[in-house]
Amino acid sequence: MQRLGPSFGIGFVAGLRSMTACAALSWAASQRRTRVTWIPDNPGARGLITALALAEMAGDKMPFAPDRRIPPSFAARLAIGAAGGVALAEPRALRRNAALAGMAGAIASTLLGRAARGGTTRSTSGMARGLTEDVVAAGLAVAFVQNAMPQRRKPLGESSHDDPPAW
């Protein structure tokens, strides 16, 4: 049986804060907790991606911040959720299922997060809801990285007889 909780979970983080999910994946890759090698894991990349995650959190509170449901933003969240789902899936999980679980998490939190935030961040309560969302996204990201299984990462296309098909 495939455990797809981490896949769904990192997708959920991507729906709340897309760059927080990217930063979490970079930290997971640096700890060899991903099943792919294409996630940047060197200290410079981790620092840059983490800084971008913090900037996203700050920018999210600005009155000009775009709605997370607009097509480009929504598509990016789905793509990050899918990639993250594959990266954090257990070794025996099919990549297709892991990607779909990540996308499902991204869809769920994109819609739930927007509904919970309401229409504006200009009010004190809107700002508080945004900050709460930041804390939830960061906390979940840390939890999913810490609980991801250490894995032997292989380049794309490399497989062994024990691996399930890539898709």
Image (cartoon, rainbow, N blue to C red):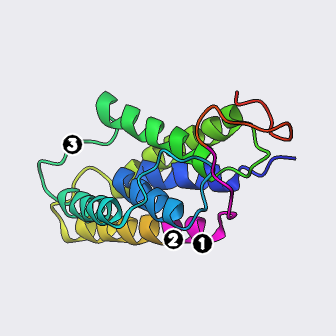
Q: Which residue is mark 3?
A: 66
* Three-letter code, disc 3: Pro
Q: Residue at x 66, y 41 (%)?
A: 98
Q: CA distance from mark 1 to mark 3?
A: 31 Å
Residue drawn at point x = 64 percent, y = 56 percent: 6
**Residue 149 locus on image (x, y percent):** 70, 63
The mark lying in front, picked from 1 and 3, is 1
> How many residues crowd around disc 1 within 10 Å: few (fewer than 14), some, or many (20 or more)?
some
Residue range corresponding to the magenta coloring? 140-154
Q: Looking at the picture, does residue 47 appear above or below residue 17?
A: below
Q: Could you say whether the residue bearing mark 1 is in a helix, strand or loop?
A: helix
Q: Amino acid at mark 1?
A: Gln
Q: Which mark is residue 142?
A: 2
Q: Residue 4's spot in the image, x, y percent?
A: 72, 49
Q: Which residue is mark 1?
A: 146
Quadrant of the image occupied by residue 76: top left
Q: Residues within 10 Å of mark 2 (few under 14, many from 20)?
A: many
> Looking at the image, how many numbered discs can be counted on the residues?
3
Closer-to-camera residue (96/108) = 96
Q: Residue shown at 29%/72% (left/top)? A: 128
